[in-house]
Image (cartoon, helix red, strand yellow):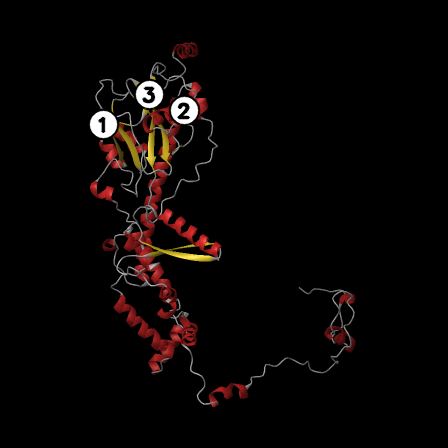
Amino acid sequence: MQRLCAKLARSLVPARGFCTSNSDKIVASVLFERLPVVIPKIDPVIYAFQEFSFRWGQQFRREYPDQFLKKSDTRFKLQMPSTIVARHMFCRGTGSYQIDYVPAPRITEADKTDDKRSLQRALDRRLYLLLYGTTYGDPSGEPVWHFPEKAYESEETLRKCAETALESVIGDLSHTYFVGNAPMGHMQLPVCKRFFFKSQVIAANSFKVGKCKDFAWVTKDELLERFPEQAAEFLKKMIIS
Amino acid sequence: MIRIVGVRNLKPLSPSAESLSHQFTQRCSVSGTAKGKGKAKAGQPLKRSKITTKKGAAEEPPAKGGGPRKTELDQMIDNCLNASAPVRFLKPKGRAREAEREKMGLMSEARRKEIESLKKQQSENDSPTIIGTEGLDLIKLGVVDADAIPKYKLTVEDGRRLAKEYSRVLMRKHRARQAAESTLLRLKKEAIEALPDNLKAAALVPDQTPFPANRFMATLTPPIPGYIDKITEAAKKSAVKEKLR
């Protein structure tokens, strides 16, 4: 008797989950990120140990005279002794050539002016593209900060829908790389289901971003400030750094 | 337990003259026959090569009137070849022997130099050590905050303390990264599960296209705008010069 009841119950309840999500609109969002350009800052404790082990080993190494160690420097005079000057050597055919250069600073002008529209800011962190405008998730129509997105209509795959979404915002996809065919996360909203796809900036310094009132390239902390609490909790898990 | 060996297998203990000559004559590598006459005679001691020190020749140059003065280059080479390390590596026995000698009042040249270099090191301790090329070390570029580096002395105890802290910090970071990556994978699986059937099948297909070759890795300093043009221009100019020759 109990088995019959269980069988009946199973046949009545739909096989897929316990909430009917088939009628939900599916929206593909794109997490468009610029990867770090410079290595992140090193923890002082790590540097201290590496310095200690270097100095410990140096104790047991032969100390060659300075005249020998700086022999290569005496051939080419330093042009700007007060600033840091490094040399680039490149070989072409029979000769080798040297060009003096000053290494570019890790903190750029965009960092100093806090220009959120620039890709040259926060070079040691990842930057994510956010648009300010209307979104599918908010039916009130008020502009909010959101990721580039598009509702799924009849494309072959959801990744193609995401690619179309990004293309409509930045123009062309020649400087983008979509990572994998699968989404990296999803959010169940009252009116739709949003799937996130990861895409990376490839060899580009700036993009012409359209189809929005405003846009910004933000770090993870700044991104979490612009979303409501629940969404921020989810994004905190989905985005590592 | 005594091992009994077959009597037939035992070889005679005293070598005969024939076997000696067989051992000491050179054999041709191909045929195995003797190479020429056997010059070594049985019962006579072998001729060993002797390294003769030519004392007469070494004394000649100074006798010529002071000898030629060493050039700067030769002096530098001598200094490099005779360079010593600030701290000599001695095993505990060696260290104990040196301590005993010092108690007796004897001190070797090497030990004297070591003490001098240790005094120099202590005076130079305040300035941070530059690791790597002078203009491109991590402190100068701002990758590490010089103020936040913990102070330490170059001793075994401090080394152990630093090693433990280093290990703790790295392991904490590693575990955080592992946890974050596991969360990423879990969220991805959940997202795939939440897709409708037709889209799920497409999402499960692995993407075999390689990532683009011009996707740069993070470097120590950012790229200098306009630098690559300068390099290509300089290379073109030098190529033109070579062609004119």
**B81 lies above or below A130:** below
State the residue position of label 2. Answer: A160
Amino acid at pointer 3? Lys
Q: Secondary structure at mark 2?
A: helix
| Label ID, residue B238 | none
Residue B18 lies in quadrant? bottom right
In the depicted view, which residue is nearer to us: A137 or A130? A130
In the depicted view, which residue is nearer to us: A58 or B44? A58
Protein chain holding label 3: A
Q: CA distance from mark 2 to mark 3?
A: 17 Å
Residue B1 lies in quadrant? bottom right
> Comparing marks 2 and 3, which lies closer to the viewer?
2
Q: Quadrant of the C terminus of chain A?
A: top left
**A133 lies above or below B166:** above
Amino acid at pointer 2? Lys
Are the residues flagged by discs 2 and 1 from a single subunit?
A: yes
Are the residues flagged by discs 2 and 3 from a single subunit?
A: yes
Q: In the displayed image of the protein, which residue is found farthest to the front?
A: B244
Closer to the chain start, of discs 2 and 1, is 2
Kindly tell me whether residue B86 is visible in this rendering. no
Q: Secondary structure at mark 3?
A: strand
Q: Give the x, y percent position of residue B46.
A: 68, 80
Protein chain holding label 1: A
State the residue position of label 1. Answer: A228
Kindly tell me whether residue A95 is visible in this rendering. yes
Q: Give the x, y percent position of residue A82.
A: 26, 60
